[in-house]
Amino acid sequence: MTAADAPAPIRVGIADDQELVRAGFRLILEAEPDIEVVGEAGDGREALTMAVRDRPDVVLMDIQMPILDGIEATRRLADHPVRTVILTTFERDDYIRAAVAAGASGFLLKNAPPEDLVAAVRVVAGGDALLSPSVTRRVLAQLTDGSPDPAATERLGALTEREVEVLRLVAGGMSNAEIARALVLGEATVKTHVSRVLTKLGLRDRVQAVVFAYESGLAKPGAAPPS
């Protein structure tokens, strides 16, 4: 493959009110050949300007920033072609729920190792979504008291039997490749099923799909992962 044939690097914007934090993230990300940091912002309002001006594929968004916080900035970017990974030093359930509701595609603690930050950018840029495992367990335990939401359960009726099965495995934290192996399907077929599930249920990404699975009773906190 020639340089001209190489895929374009992932364009990343960094929004954090601490300059040292931004510099650290930039250092980590720009060491990767497939990632390019295209802009920085010190508050939520600057983050909105940066997202429109520099057109990043992914914005790393701090929650606690002056003028406009990261949750509201994420909400205002929901209709733009940019995906957001929320970064915070706080593992607070209310932050996590708010981030999901605002349309964030990922949630990662700032004390996560550098390799997790890089992986988060790649996963989200690829159209997937993520919550760190510890965060996922906490937020899903808070999102449901174990009683299915009847409206959400009824919406499951729009899915085929195979799509319900795929959604259950998505809720179990499986990637498309893992689901393909479990169901003996091609990975492209699984990707199509996931896309149809999101479309039929009116969901933005896998984060919202996981939340829906728990709200509908299809998945339950504390249940063993699917085998």
Image (cartoon, rainbow, N blue to C red):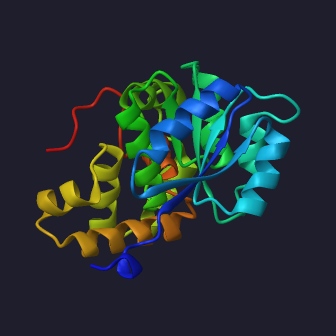
Residue 96 in sight from this viewpoint: no
Residue at the spot x=61%, y=27% of the render?
Answer: 21
Q: From the image, which quarter does the C terminus lie in? A: top left
User: Is residue 152 shown left or right of residue 98?
Assistant: left
Q: Nearer the viewer, residue 22 or 128?
A: 22
Using residue 181 as the reference point, say whether residue 96 is left or right of it: right
- Residue at horizontal 54 percent and vertical 20 percent from the top: 91
Quarter-of-image position of residue 14: top right
**Quadrant in the picture for the N terminus:** bottom left
- 36 or 149: which is nearer to us? 36
Which of these two is toward me, 136 or 223?
136
x 60%, y 33%: residue: 23
Q: Nearer the viewer, residue 80 or 182?
A: 80
Task: Report whether 71 appears left or right of 195.
Answer: right
Q: Determine the residue located farthest toward the right in the rendered image.
A: 67
Above/below status of 105 relative to 163:
above
Residue at 68% over, 45% down: 102
Residue 54, horizontal then vertical, whole percent:
71, 61
Residue 19 makes an appearance in the image: yes
Callout count = 0
From the top left corner, tell me how far across and down residue 85 is, in percent. Answer: 56, 43
Image height of 75 relative to 2, above or below: above
Query: Percent position (x, y) of residue 8?
Result: 47, 70
State the residue lying farthest toward the front: 3
